[in-house]
Amino acid sequence: MEIFIGIRGNTRQLGFDIDMSENELMAKVNEALASAHGVLDLTDTKGQRTLVPAHAIGFVQIAAKTERRVGFALH
């Protein structure tokens, strides 16, 4: 699944693919936000780990992963 995380005070957003369900992601986000010094800890499909302090999270956007089309298609 593809996600985007908006960081407060920054016009750019983090975007990457993760291998987890929407419910698993929401549980991690809620856990990070509930803690006083929480950190959202995610690993993408390439194995890169991203740590975001919960107080810096502006938004989390969840998008269904779309398969890339290859070649030409006639409709």
Image (cartoon, rainbow, N blue to C red):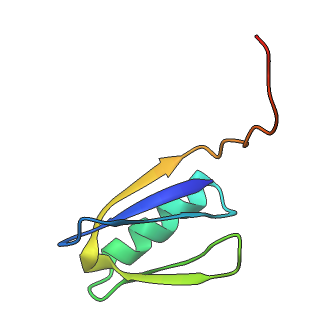
Q: Is residue 36 left or right of residue 44?
A: left
Residue situated in front as seen by the camera: 27 or 56: 56
Residue situated in front as seen by the camera: 6 or 27: 6
- Residue drawn at point x = 17 percent, y = 72 percent: 9
Q: Position of residue 21 (x, y in %)?
A: 64, 55
- Residue drawn at point x = 63 percent, y = 72 percent: 44
Looking at the image, the residue that sits furthest to the front is 72
Q: Answer with the quarter of the image where residue 39 lies.
A: bottom left
Looking at the image, the residue that sits furthest to the bottom is 37
Against 21, residue 70 (above or below) is: above
Against 42, residue 29 (above or below) is: above
Quarter placement of the C terminus? top right
Q: Position of residue 25 (x, y in %)?
A: 54, 62
Q: Is residue 11 left or right of residue 6?
A: left
Residue situated in front as seen by the camera: 6 or 68: 68
Q: Answer with the quarter of the image where residue 6 lies.
A: bottom left
- Residue drawn at point x = 58 percent, y = 84 percent: 49
Looking at the image, the residue that sits furthest to the left is 9
Q: Position of residue 16 (x, y in %)?
A: 56, 64
Q: Is residue 28 left or right of residue 9?
A: right
Q: Is residue 18 left or right of residue 59?
A: right
Give the total of numbered labels.
0
Q: Position of residue 34 (x, y in %)?
A: 32, 74
- Residue drawn at point x = 70 percent, y = 63 percent: 19
Against 46, residue 61 (above or below) is: above
Q: Answer with the quarter of the image where residue 18 lies.
A: bottom right
